[in-house]
Image: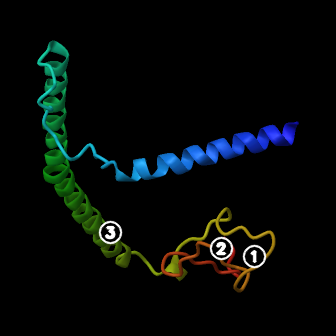
């Protein structure tokens, strides 16, 4: 009983799909972007006028933010980049006037090593920068 009923339903569904497929394929699909204006059959009422006003407001607001992002944000990014570059150069210029790394005071709380690191020679951290970091194992405070 059940297999017969399922078979009947399956045949009905497949027949409907076969009949409906050519009809669907011949109908032209209209996209929302084809016509931006209100169609001629649309009624000129308060709702449609309000929707048109909202659309106009959205267009002007998006235009404002587009102009802000082009004419305000991009120059601010350029100015910030120039400022960061100048600060970077000043920092290294100042660093050149300091005594060499070997002559600087090494305090007991710096470069504490309980055991060796598993990489390199075991003495340098993973973020070690040889231009600014120095560790003398033999030196005591």
- CB under 8 Å between discs 3 and 1: no
| Image mark for residue 88 | 3
The residue that mark 1 highlights is: 117
Along the line of sight, the residue nearer the viewer: 121 or 29 = 29
Q: CA distance from mark 3 to mark 1?
A: 31 Å
Along the line of sight, the residue nearer the viewer: 41 or 77 = 41
Quarter of the picture holding the C terminus: bottom right
Q: Residue 31: x percent and y percent?
A: 28, 46
Q: Residue 129: x percent and y percent?
A: 53, 77
| Image mark for residue 125 | 2
Question: Which mark is first along the chain, 3 or 2?
Answer: 3
Q: Is residue 95 left or right of residue 56?
A: right
Q: Residue 24: x percent and y percent?
A: 41, 48
Looking at the rendered structure, the secondary structure element under dot 1 is: loop
Along the line of sight, the residue nearer the viewer: 12 or 107 = 12
Residue furthest to the right: 1
């Amino acid at each position: 009983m059940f297999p017969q009923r399922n078979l009947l339903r399956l045949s009905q569904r497949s027949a409907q799909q076969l009949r409906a497929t050519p009809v669907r394929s011949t109908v032209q699909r209209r996209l929302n972007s084809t016509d931006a204006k209100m169609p001629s059959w649309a009624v000129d009422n308060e709702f449609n006028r309000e929707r048109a006003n909202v659309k106009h407001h959205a267009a002007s607001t998006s235009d404002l933010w587009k102009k802000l992002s082009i004419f305000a944000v991009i120059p601010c990014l350029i100015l910030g980049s120039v400022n960061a570059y100048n600060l970077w150069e000043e920092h290294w210029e100042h660093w050149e006037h300091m005594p060499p790394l070997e002559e600087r005071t090494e305090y007991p709380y710096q470069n504490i090593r309980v055991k060796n690191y598993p990489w390199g020679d075991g003495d340098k951290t993973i973020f070690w920068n040889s231009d600014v970091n120095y560790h003398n194992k033999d030196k005591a405070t």
